[in-house]
Amino acid sequence: MTILAAEAFGLQPLWIILVAVLWIGFFVLEGFDFGVAMLVPFLGKGEKGKDDQARRVVINTIGPHWDGNEVWLLTAGGATFAAFPAWYATLFSGLYLPLFLVLVGLILRGVAFEYRSKREAPQWRYTWDWLMAIGSFIPALVLGVGFAWFLAGIPVGMAPAAFGNEAVFVAGGLDQWNLLLVVLTNVFALVGGLLFVALFLAHGAYFVALKTRGAVHDRAQEYGSTLGLVAAVLMLIFVVWGNLRMGPNGVLGVPWFPGEGATDLFGLLAWVVGILALAGLCFAWWMNSKKRDGWAFIGTTIATAMLVVMIFLHMNTGLGFADKTLIDMTSAASSNHTLTLMTIAAVCLVPVVLAYTAWSYFFVFRRRLNTVSIPALTVNTQN
Amino acid sequence: MSPDSLARWQFGITTVYHYLFVPLTISMSVLTAVLQSLWYNTDKDAYLRLTRFFGRLFLINFAMGVVTGIVQEFQFGMGWSEYSRFVGDIFGAPLALEALIAFFLESTFLGIWIFGWDRLSKRVHLLSIWIAAMGTVISSIFIVAANAWMQNPTGAHYDPEQNRATLDSFTEVIANPVFLTQWPHTIATSMMVGSGFMAGIAFYLFVTKARDKAPADDVSAYRTGLRFGSWILIVSGVLTVITGDLLGKEMVVSQPIKMAAAENLLSPEYVGKGGEVGFQIIPGVEVFPGLINVLYGTMIAPDMETILTYQVDTQGYHHWDRTSPNGRWIEGTPLQYGESSVLYLNYGVNDHVPDSYSIAPNVPVAFWSFRLMMGLGFLAGVGGILLLVATDRKKIPQPRKLWTLVCLALPLFPLLGNSFGWIFTEMVRQPWIVNGVMTTAEGHSPFVGTGPALFTLIGFTVLYGVLAVVEVGLLLKYIKMGLPEAEEITIKNDDDELSFAY
């Protein structure tokens, strides 16, 4: 243990990377199931009277997976709490209202998946379908806005806290309503929010195309070509704007151009990674138009992962806050002791989780679905 | 209402609500796995039908448990930022590990179990429900360990530079005697909830289907289910009493004020620092101190009265020194163990609790929640015995009012008993969020104002209320539908119809 503790110097950056990996896992996996759920009311159209079966095909592509995908969010949140308590405390209390919106969305969609087919009445089912779409749209949008703010750097300030001490708070403890307004109306952040929504819609459409056959499959491909294009345009704006406007240390408003700050490795890498994200999307769109479902899905997977990497590169050691002197990787971190224990746990367990998740996706539920594979409209076959 | 009171209400409402589904789904996952194992071993249709019947009731509850659980992890940071900042070095790790170890297991393998009936061999499919059940049990280990640390903060010291609690030893956190007694109690009481649920529902269907001359196979399957549930209810009831006794004795040591409040033994002289009376003695209720000494006194040197006199005299926070051979009460909290920590000295009650603040818990809540917890659990156990007697030797009881009551009581009493148990555990720790170390008022996010706090409080309450109606409606519908037919389960090709789909 002492040897590990002595090497703890590298543990804080390692945990930033691990938190980034967890967010990548979340957005890559939950990203497509956000997209799939948002598309349910649109892709789920069949010949007369067959809407419900088509919708069920769409929902069942993510049926066995959505819950596991969501655990990546809980793990990212838990890891942030354990590795950087001050990051978790400042961020979550500062974004109180936006996070409430995310939670409401996640509650609605989770219940919707499980309950929508539990009654036969079309009204019941269609209500849940819309709730799962809206409940996926809200978190995608709000998390996109939030991650754009991470890139820009969320303003922070000191304010009085427990024990008569001062602590770091978002916007120095600004009133939550004003904060919500500021957070949601920043144009760059809104582009980020829309980008996340469009990217996940495209990601979801390609996933549905990959996992289905028949009419649903064809419609998913059609949607995918429009959505891929919209997402690519938004990605272009976000990558260029984000990398141009944001300084190498994520300070809002400091212009940075390649050449001027080329010594800043992170800034340079952010450009490279951002362009890869854009390239991934273009590739996905191209493959979708060539009806190569698997490659299209891989394209949006790369785009999503690279987008998160780009944002984390801009965050650098500042945890997405604007002022590193108040809070950064070092001052927010847990003790080396805790980080060491957590590192051992993560190194041992993450590969196991990845292994059985892969087994579930690639072995147990590898097949494509069709409207003929959905059992007749009866509730008694429900498990 | 002040923002921190609103935050308390929100945490209370969302947590009690979430905890309706937790004990039910922990135990139902295990019991469903047992039923499926019985089917696997005997190949009897009745077990398969019971597995699928209770399996889907389990899933209806599980969905609610999952979505309300996400709120739990987020609201430590949202509503209790200063608590999170202070304890994150210790408290964060169990939450992260719970997600990493337990939640991934249960969600992935439950997905595999739900959709995998026709995709996997019987053996692997059975394994998937067992792994999912294991996941739910493992999650309880981490969260109860985290909670036990709030009751009795071991394995940590105060770091004045960072102004927070710092982990000394994870082993000590896990070896926390409160955890070692609280976790078995949690599991035993959880098993009472699931088995009571099974027994009550199976009994209702048994009696009504027998009256309606349903096929003999159905009736006998219900009988199997109700006797299975009743036996487990009784066994877990006995385990609940044993573990509860151990936990009670542990609390006398680590949280004497809590147990004193539960027994209404706090004397009126025991008041908060400001000298105001911080609680009220329930009028007309007398508890025999002698009985308390029989229950708790034998294991520790001073009897309850001595403890309380000492507490009153010094008006400070004290705990039982386990390292001393004969035991003794020492000032401070376990955070100081073996450390040069100054946590208590700096932030002990005498310094940082405002004058107007009482350090005594709410005695009526303590007294009644403690009794409701035990009473409801005890009645549920009696209900289990009644069912076994009533259905002995193929007897079929006639529908009667008594049986209707029993059918309602068996699922609900253990559930409510669990709720009161946690209300007792959490509310009677007050005013502390970390016992003896940090007050709940200090843990609150200071910049979540009244408006936003009220908004989210109403938002969650309304949403949870509506979902409760929806979920109970579905439960009733699926209970009334009764046992599904035992379908032949075959491994299907990729083009065949799914045997299970949303």
Image (tube, coloured by chain):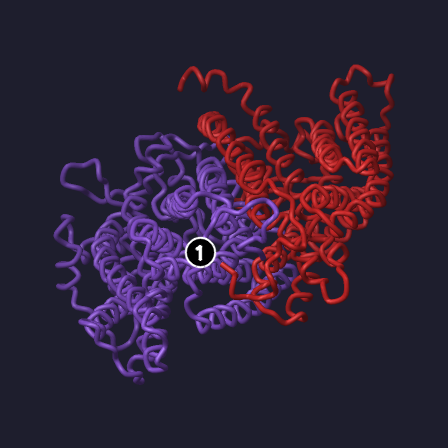
At x 59%, y 48%, the residue is A66
At x 53%, y 55%, the residue is B499
A290 above or below A35?
A: above
Does residue B143 show up?
A: no
The chain in red: A
Q: Nearer the viewer, residue B319 or B426?
A: B426
Q: Nearer the viewer, residue B352 or A29?
A: A29
**Residue B446 placed where, x, y %?**
59, 51
Does residue B395 show up?
A: yes
* Secondary structure at numbered mark 1: loop
Q: Is residue A124 left or right of residue B440?
A: right
A363 above or below B216?
A: above
Q: Is residue B384 left or right of residue B300?
A: right
Quadrant in the picture for the C terminus of chain B: bottom right
Report which quarter residue B449 is drawn in.
bottom right
Identify residue for label 1: B488
Q: Nearer the viewer, residue A162 or A237?
A: A237
Chain for disc number 1: B
**Residue B213 placed where, x, y %?**
35, 80
**Residue A87 placed where, x, y %?**
60, 37
At x 45%, y 29%, the residue is A345
The chain in purple: B
Kindly identify the amino acid type of the residue bearing the numbered disc 1: Glu
Quadrant in the picture for the N terminus of chain B: bottom right
Dot 1, crowdedness within 10 Å: few (<14), some or many (≥20)? few
